[in-house]
Image (cartoon, rainbow, N blue to C red):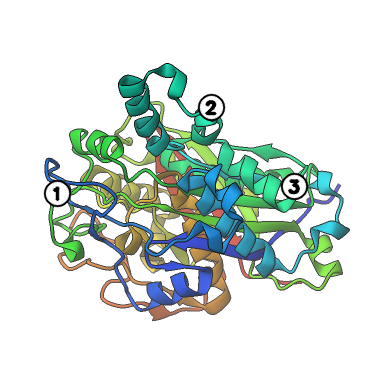
């Protein structure tokens, strides 16, 4: 049986530099950095003062007030991005078999806001006054659950939780679901909103966050002075569709998704393998899945968190996976402008991958000023560039050693 082909037909994004895919993409092309002082809580006692918050988000712009009240911020982001992606795709789900349309949307954490709020209520007012909807609003699968409810998706509905690799794993497994015939349509990606006191304090005490107060030097992947990531929030959702299904309805096709690789370092709960061998294997598996060679890839959207170990190990992983072809790759990190969206990162970066292929434009790695001799690749320093992109990959690497790579290529009939 011939392998079913999968294409990207819709995009949706809620990000710190723009709500909506076009606003987001235009901000990236302009090199806009969405990092600023935290406004969601008082940081007086915190060493960390900066985050990449989503600005001016109003849930009522995307759903009715009653629905919004039954969703925490991460779920609201997911529904907003999913609705945009669905509208962008031109799909009329009333004409589709709802059991062949599903979603795979990850969140690494769920709602810390509700945990903090309801724990405070329990300790001050007693357990009988905890919100009855606390659990269904808090658990991480509710991003996928709420998207299915709002869009009428009755097919496969999953939430793969792999920390910072969640978004990419969900897209990869959604791709697999279509390839094997479990679905014709899948909404896939990630959503996260964890800029809360306990969330920031936890990463801060792990010494994972940069403590600078200069937004332009806070998230600087691959720079010699990188010193931790910046926590961000948002959502990125793609509509993935079986090719013949998309062609039959005359859908616009951004790119073809043709490869997925997933591995585990099996090494440490937070630190990646120093030689990058686990991430390199994920990239090789994605290439094998797509039937492509290293020299066929033009661009890598790196995980690029701006932590010393991650950027170094990912550089080694790219060199290991691509060999001599690594020197011809354009590599950039979206996190340089929007911070690290944790479980949503892979979803938002997949939107970037599709737009990069569609427009033939690679965005810059913002803030990269001082070259690290140990990180010696073309990181698109200084400004973005026009570049015909035949095929590209996106990497996501999560705590626990989770590695995921997706591969998209220019669609050819």
| Quadrant of the rendered image containing residue 35 | bottom left
Q: Position of residue 24 (x, y in %)?
A: 45, 70
Give the farthest residue toward the bottom: 386
Q: How many marks?
A: 3
Decide: few, some or many residues near mark 1? Use Cα within 10 Å; few <14, some 14-19, many ≥20: some
**Does 352 sit above or below residue 343?**
below
Name which of mark 1 and mark 2 comes first in the sequence. 2
Q: Mark 3 sits on what residue?
A: 153
Name which of mark 2 and mark 3 comes first in the sequence. 2
Q: Residue at position x 49%, y 33% from top?
A: 138
Give the farthest residue toward the top: 127
Asked if residue 411 lies left or right of residue 110, the reply is right
Disc 1 vs disc 2: Cβ atoms closer than 8 Å? no
Give the mark toward the camera: 3 or 1: 3
What separation in Å lies between label 1 and label 2 (alpha carbons)? 38 Å
Disc 3 vs disc 1: Cβ atoms closer than 8 Å? no
Q: Residue at position x 48%, y 29% from top?
A: 131
In the foreground, 222 or 109: 109
Decide: few, some or many residues near mark 3? Use Cα within 10 Å; few <14, some 14-19, many ≥20: many
Q: Mark 2 sits on what residue?
A: 132
Decide: few, some or many residues near mark 2? Use Cα within 10 Å; few <14, some 14-19, many ≥20: few
Does the image show residue 114? Answer: yes
Does the image show residue 294? Answer: no
Circle 3 sits in a helix, a strand or a loop, which is it? Answer: loop
């Amino acid at each position: 049986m011939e392998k079913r082909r999968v294409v990207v037909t819709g995009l949706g994004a809620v990000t710190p530099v723009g709500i909506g895919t076009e606003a987001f993409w235009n901000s990236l092309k302009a090199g806009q950095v969405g990092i600023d002082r935290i406004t969601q809580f008082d940081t007086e006692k915190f060493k960390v003062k900066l985050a990449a918050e989503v600005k001016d988000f109003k849930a009522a712009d995307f759903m009715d007030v009653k629905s919004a009240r039954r969703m925490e911020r991460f779920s609201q982001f997911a529904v907003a991005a999913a609705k945009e992606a669905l509208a962008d795709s031109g799909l009329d789900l009333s004409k589709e078999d709802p059991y062949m349309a599903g979603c795979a949307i990850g969140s690494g954490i769920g709602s810390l806001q509700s945990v903090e709020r309801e724990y405070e209520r329990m300790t001050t007012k007693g357990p009988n006054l905890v919100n009855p909807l606390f659990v269904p609003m808090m658990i991480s699968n509710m991003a996928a659950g709420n998207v299915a409810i709002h869009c009428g998706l009755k097919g496969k509905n999953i939430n793969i939780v792999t920390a910072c690799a969640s978004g990419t794993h969900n897209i990869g497994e959604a791709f697999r679901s279509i390839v094997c015939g479990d679905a014709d349509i899948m909404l896939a990606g990630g959503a996260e909103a964890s800029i809360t006191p306990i969330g920031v304090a936890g990463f801060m005490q792990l010494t994972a966050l940069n403590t600078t107060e200069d937004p332009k030097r806070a998230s600087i992947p691959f720079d010699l002075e990188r010193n931790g990531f910046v926590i961000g929030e948002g959502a990125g959702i793609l509509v993935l569709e079986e090719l013949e299904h998309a062609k039959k309805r005359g859908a616009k096709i951004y790119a073809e998704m043709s490869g997925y690789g997933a591995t585990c370092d099996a090494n440490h709960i937070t630190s990646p393998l120093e030689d990058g061998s686990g991430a390199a294997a994920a990239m090789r598996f994605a290439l094998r899945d797509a039937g492509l060679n290293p020299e066929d890839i033009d661009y890598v959207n790196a995980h690029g968190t701006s932590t010393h170990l991650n950027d170094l190990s990912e550089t080694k992983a790219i060199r290991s996976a691509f060999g001599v072809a690594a020197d011809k790759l354009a590599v950039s990190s979206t996190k340089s402008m929007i911070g690290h969206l944790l479980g949503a990162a892979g979803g938002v970066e997949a939107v970037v991958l599709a737009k990069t292929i569609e427009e033939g434009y690679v965005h810059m790695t913002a803030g990269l000023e001082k070259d690290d001799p140990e990180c010696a690749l073309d990181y698109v320093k200084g400004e973005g560039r026009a570049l015909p992109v035949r095929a590209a990959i996106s990497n996501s690497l999560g705590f626990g050693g989770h590695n995921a790579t997706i591969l998209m290529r220019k669609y050819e009939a």
